[in-house]
Image (cartoon, helix red, strand yellow):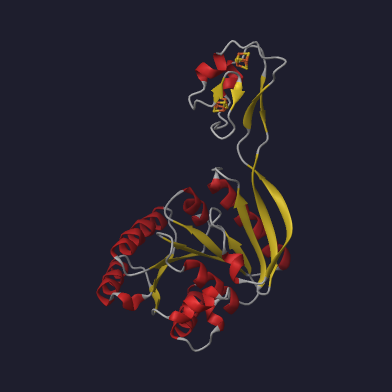
């Protein structure tokens, strides 16, 4: 079984549109949407959620009114300012457990805390695992790991040979969580100064974790000179540029209609994407 992880140094590079198009082109596979802060791959498919399971984040402190003698020790020990007058603010509590150790009255317990939902959907292109993180919740790296684990489990059960993972943008813990054991990491970039800078950062991250990377340049023709610079950088790092997608209004029209743009056959973007997919399959 192989896993293709698609990431970008920043948001708005067209990563999810590309993943949706790959999902149309691939045979038996499962999709994993690991952009858990802004999960939207399902918006490009006819999909329906068939199952949900809670995602438990770090446990949070809870103070028993009956046992608390209002000594204030827990408030003094909490470095996150999460306790005020024997009341725990759940949004500020980091679940470190120090208050429980400090409380001589035994009034504090650490309780399970639902931080989001993992969802399983059926789509016209195969099964998909995605997730929703609760408002103001963090620990998203752990949630990404869970989504990938569930997707792998389903792929194993169904004997599928491919997982296509829509990774998060940036270089934070969610991305790091996406890189472990990925067979190939496709970095989607665009030829702007920020695009180049962010691509270099994310490529360094992949390199740091001994990942295998390829690069695809979206809207390459908005700056041929910057595209050339991206190709030079990739050449110097021995990273293949597997394709360049031209600026194409077909992509925006497809996005507007909630469909993967590859379904608009013979458009410049679709033709380029077919070539990219072919190259990725060879690399996988
Ligand atoms: S340390 Fe325990 S007894 Fe003291 S205020 Fe906190 S919860 Fe109450
Ligand atoms: S678990 Fe840690 S962060 Fe949460 S209230 Fe207790 S001391 Fe503060």
Q: Is residue 31 visible?
A: yes
In this view, 230 is above or below 180: below
Q: Position of residue 56 (x, y in %)?
A: 65, 42
Q: Residue at x 41, y 57 (%)?
A: 206
Q: Is residue 183 left or right of residue 66?
A: left
Q: Is residue 1 visible?
A: no
In this view, 123 is above or below 61: below
**In this view, which residue lies farthest toward the right?**
50
Q: Residue at x 54, y 47 (%)?
A: 140
Q: Residue at x 35, y 56 (%)?
A: 201
Q: Quadrant of ligand 2?
A: top right
Q: Is residue 80 left or right of residue 222?
A: right
In this view, 141 is above or below 243: above
**In this view, which residue lies farthest toward the bottom?**
266
- In this view, the residue in front, 232 or 141, is 141
Q: Looking at the rendering, which quadrant does residue 27 occupy?
A: bottom right
**For the N terminus, which image quadrant?**
bottom right
- In this view, the residue in front, 95 or 249, is 249
In this view, 21 is above or below 101: below
Q: Position of residue 262 (x, y in %)?
A: 53, 80
Q: Position of residue 210 (x, y in %)?
A: 43, 56
Q: Residue at x 51, y 71 (%)?
A: 17
What count of labels does the image hold?
Answer: 0
Q: Position of residue 239 (x, y in %)?
A: 36, 68
């Amino acid at each position: 079984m192989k896993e293709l992880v698609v990431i970008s140094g920043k948001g708005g590079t067209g990563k999810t549109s590309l993943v949706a198009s790959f999902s149309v082109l691939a045979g038996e596979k499962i999709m994993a949407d690991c952009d858990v802060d802004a999960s939207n791959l399902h918006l490009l498919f006819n999909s329906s959620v068939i199952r949900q399971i809670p995602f438990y984040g770090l446990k949070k402190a809870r103070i028993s009114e009956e046992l608390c003698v209002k000594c204030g020790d827990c408030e003094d020990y909490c470095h996150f300012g999460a306790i005020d007058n024997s009341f725990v603010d759940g949004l500020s509590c980091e679940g470190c457990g120090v208050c429980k150790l400090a409380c001589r009255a035994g009034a504090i317990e650490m309780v399970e805390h639902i931080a989001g939902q993992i969802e399983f959907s059926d789509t016209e292109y195969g099964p998909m695992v995605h997730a929703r993180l609760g408002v103001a919740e963090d620990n998203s790296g752990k949630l990404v790991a869970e989504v990938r684990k569930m997707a792998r489990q389903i792929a194993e059960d169904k004997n599928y040979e491919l997982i296509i993972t829509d990774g998060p943008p940036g270089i934070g813990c969610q991305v790091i969580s996406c890189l472990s054991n990925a067979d190939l990491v496709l970095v989607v970039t665009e030829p702007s100064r920020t695009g180049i800078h962010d691509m270099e950062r994310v490529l360094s991250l992949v390199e740091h974790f001994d990942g295998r990377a390829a690069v695809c340049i979206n809207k390459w023709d908005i700056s041929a000179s910057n595209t050339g610079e991206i190709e030079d950088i990739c050449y110097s790092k021995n990273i293949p540029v597997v394709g360049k997608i031209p600026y194409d209004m077909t992509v925006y029209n497809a996005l507007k209609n909630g469909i993967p743009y590859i379904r608009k056959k013979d458009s410049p973007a679709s033709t380029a994407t077919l070539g990219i997919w072919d190259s990725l399959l060879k690399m996988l």
